[in-house]
Each structure stands twice: as structure tokens, then as C-alpha cells.
Amino acid sequence: MKKIVFTLSVLLGLLACHIANAQTGTYPNRQIKIISPFATGGIADGFSRIIAQGLSEAFGQPVIVENKTGGGGNIGADFVAKSPADGYTLIMGSIGTHAVNPYLVKSMPYDPLKDFVPVVFVLDAEGLLAVNPNLPVKNVPELIAYLKANPGKVSYGSGGIGTASHLAGELFVMTAKVDMTHIPYKGNALAITDLIGGQTQVMFATMPTILPYVKSDKLRGLAVTGASRDPSMPDLPSISETLPGFDVKNWIGLFAPVGTPPAIVKKLHDEVGKIMQQPAVQKKLESEGAKYYAMTPEAFGAFQKKESVRWGKIIKSAGIKPE
């Protein structure tokens, strides 16, 4: 009997090893696709391509980026949620697609917490509050005073519903107790174009997408959206200096469909971590006003849930109804 039990345990052990090897030993043996639910030209799409190139070099297999935009990122996220859980279809998710959209979209086609497994945290990009130069304000206190004197007459653009630029605007409206009209666009580029043209007057955008226009005086930068000043621009105040507690993390990360084998998740996590810590990529992060934080998939999942809870409370307190 003992011999039979021993033999069975050995067989089970060998089977477990075989499964683990099958998950990682032959993965990947064909093309991997990273879905970018954002328009081209933004920081998330750009780093999707950096990671795709790095993974392709590491794995010896083609890794491509495919843009599936629309619905505040929901179209691309839903596509991946319903894809096979085999590690060959991934998504560059964001605070919008994987934390707050359920509070903003009435008919969600997927559950960001239940339908995905977090793979790796990629970056947190600094945001910048900028205004059209024709708006007679030069700092956050002046903007708040102007908005209170002109309720409902000023609009702010965003890269779409549920994006960090939208959330920052809603948090600003709520904490400053002002009234602004939200105008969602299909990507930050279109929103910035209308901001420069005067169709909108205010925007909260990622540093790299809007800073060139601030430096060329086409727009006026007022403050950063993070909890503290950005080391690369120490003279620019943070919104939290006027509105204590104001903090918007514009994060993105790689996710896979739920059920993806843990060994594959770990392999992807480890390789992307190596890519993000390469000197050239670190330099690119710095130039974009972004930061990479090393997190295990479990820690990233806990961070995602915390962000979802936090923004859920903020959105409900602001009285924003899902559309």
C-alpha cells in the first residue's frame, strides 16, 4: 500500500511539473497581441509599443499592438476579457478601464476586477492642469475664483469618459465646489487641439501630451495633479497646495484574461519588469514625467482594488450617475 501511495505521489508530482513546463516551456510559440484601448500618440499607447518590442526580443516571437478604441476603453477591454486565457491576448489597461468605468458606464460588458488577472504595473504618469491663455487666470486660486464667478460657463476637455483627465476634472469640481462642463473626446490629442482653439478652456492631461504646448505658450500650465510637486518641474505647484488631499494617479498596467495560468503571468511579469528597468526605458519615463514601481501581480491587484474603491466613493459623492 505504501509503495502504491508513493508511486501515486510521484506521478502527481511529475504531472504537476509537466503542466508547469507546458505553461512556460512552450510559451510563447506564436504571436502575442497587446490590445491598446487608447488612441495612438498617448503615453499608454507609446509604452505598449515599447513593451511589445522588448517582449518580442526576449521571447523570439512577434508581439504586436492593436488599437481598439471607444467606449472609454471598454471596447478593447471587453475584447480581451472574452479572449482565450492563454497569454496570447493582453491589454494595456488603465485607471479607467480597470478601476472606475463601472461607476461611470451603466451597461458594463465586463467586470474589471473579476474578468482579468493583473500581470504587471507599468507606470504612473504625472498630470498637468492647463488652460487656454485667453482665460484670465494664472494659478489655481484664480481659476477657482473665476469658476465661482462664472458657474457653468467654462468647459474642460478630457481624453474620454473614465480617463484620468476626466477623473481629475471631476475631483477638481467636487473639491473646489465649482461648476464646469465636461466635454469628452476620443483621445487627448483631439481634446488638446480644441483647448488650444478655445472650444474648451481647461484640461487635466498627462505631462508629455500637453507640456510642449505649455512651453510654446499655446497653453498656460497652472499646476500638477499629483500629491506633490514634480522633481522635473519644481517651480510648478501641485493642486494639493490649494486643495489639500487632491491626488490623481494616471496609471496603466498589463492585464490578461482571468484563468491565464500563473506560470505564464509570472513569465510576462518578470520580462516586462526587466524591460521597464532598462536605462533607455527609465530615461524615456523621466522625459515623460512618469514613474515605474515594481509590484508583484498580487500587489498590483490589491492596488487596483484600492483605486476602484477610492474612485467609486469620489464619483458617488460627486453625484455622477452612470451613463
Image (cartoon, rainbow, N blue to C red):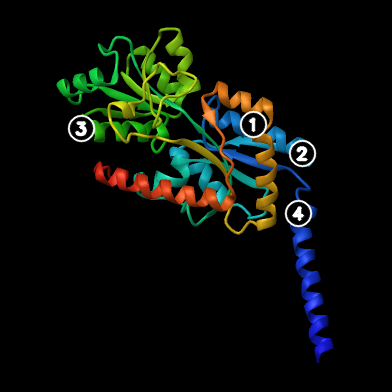
Select label 2 or label 1 by which is in front. 2
Asked which quadrant contains residue 239, the reply is top left
- Marks 2/4: CA distance? 14 Å
- Cβ–Cβ under 8 Å for marks 3 and 4: no
- Cβ–Cβ under 8 Å for marks 2 and 4: no
Circle number at residue 177: 3
Report x, y in % for residue 33. 66, 41
Name the residue at 78% across, 70% down: 15
For the residue marked with disc 2, what is the amino acid?
Answer: Ala
Looking at the rendered structure, the secondary structure element under dot 1 is helix
Select label 4 or label 1 by which is in front. 4
- Marks 1/3: CA distance? 40 Å
- Marks 2/1: CA distance? 14 Å
Among numbered discs 3 and 4, the one appearing first in the sequence: 4
Report x, y in % for residue 112. 47, 51
Among numbered discs 2 and 1, the one appearing first in the sequence: 1
Among numbered discs 3 and 2, the one appearing first in the sequence: 2
- Mark 2 packing: few (<14 Cα in 10 Å), some, or many (20+)? few
Depth check: 229 or 172 in front? 229
Q: Is residue 105 visible?
A: no
For the residue marked with disc 3, what is the amino acid?
Answer: Lys
Among numbered discs 1 and 3, the one appearing first in the sequence: 1
For the residue marked with disc 4, what is the amino acid?
Answer: Thr
Name the residue at 28% across, 45% down: 321
Name the residue at 33% across, 34% down: 246
Q: Is residue 188 visible?
A: yes
Circle number at residue 24: 4
Report x, y in % for residue 117. 56, 53
Q: Is residue 109 left or right of residue 15?
A: left
